[in-house]
Image (cartoon, coloured by chain):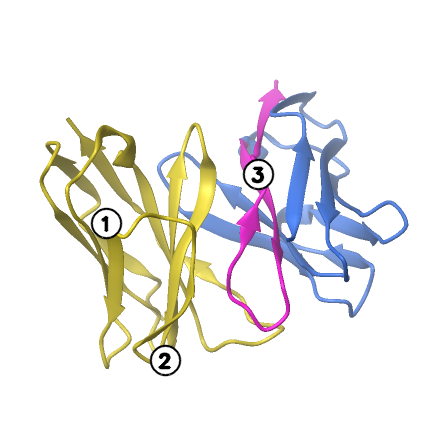
Chain colours: A blue, B yellow
Amino acid sequence: AQSVTQLGSHVSVSEGALVLLRCNYSSSVPPYLFWYVQYPNQGLQLLLKYTSAATLVKGINGFEAEFKKSETSFHLTKPSAHMSDAAEYFCAVRPFGNEKLTFGTGTRLTIIP
Amino acid sequence: KAGVTQTPRYLIKTRGQQVTLSCSPISGHRSVSWYQQTPGQGLQFLFEYFSETQRNKGNFPGRFSGRQFSNSRSEMNVSTLELGDSALYLCASSFQAGDYNEQFFGPGTRLTVL
């Protein structure tokens, strides 16, 4: 079965600092990987997705993630945090040909002014 | 293009009652998935419908059921509500099953069971 582990349920960074949110996956074959963001009282919005086309994936709002097969990781980064980035972030995995997303437990990102 | 809509947005029920939640996918989307989000269990997959057929099902008791109509709109039903069913229920739609398919999420229905 596929799964994802997000290290750190809460991360705080200063405005303008690097954002690094960690995600490790467990899968017998390289899966499809996703990062979603959830703002308070809202649904999930897709930030970016890995579908084997390129290991470095650029998403919306300046976020990017790098797929590292040797480390089974898909960490999310942003060079400079903005106050509007404060939200909860979820890493998710999806097997081929299946719509079922398996989510990590989420990381709440706080931006310090 | 309108996004995924879910109705109602908020719902309060008492134990033992039943509830029906509705999801209207993005126009042209044929796949609808449902997820339950709770502080304790996080986001968990309930089921997925495609062209009125349930294709995938998560690990939930039979009290949770769903269906999809010919216009791709979907409903999920929870019978004999328990306190633990209090959650945010999210619906997601996608055009069709596929490797590069993206799921678009609605704002959710927040169910409170008293």
- The residue segment tinted magenta is A87-113
Residue B50 in view of the camera: yes
Residue B107 in view of the camera: no
Q: Amino acid at mark 1?
A: Arg
Residue identifier under label 3: A89
Other residues around mark 3 within 10 Å, as few (<14) / some (14–19) / many (≥20): many
State the separation of the CA atoms marked 2 and 1: 30 Å
State the separation of the CA atoms marked 2 and 3: 28 Å
Contact, CB < 8 Å: mark 1 with mark 3?
no
In the structure shown, which secondary structural element does the residue marked by tag 1 occupy? loop
Residue identifier under label 1: B63
Contact, CB < 8 Å: mark 2 with mark 1?
no
Q: Is residue B62 inside the magenta stretch?
A: no
In the structure shown, which secondary structural element does the residue marked by tag 2 occupy? loop
In the structure shown, which secondary structural element does the residue marked by tag 3 occupy? strand
Contact, CB < 8 Å: mark 2 with mark 3?
no
Picture coordinates of residue B58, whole percent (x, y): 43, 54
Query: Mark 1 or mark 3: which is in front?
Result: 1
Label 3: chain?
A
Above or below, B65 against A12 in this view is below
Label 1: chain?
B
Tell me the residue at 27%/33% (across/down).
B86
Q: Nearer the viewer, residue B65 or A87?
A: B65
Q: Is residue B49 left or right of residue B83?
A: right
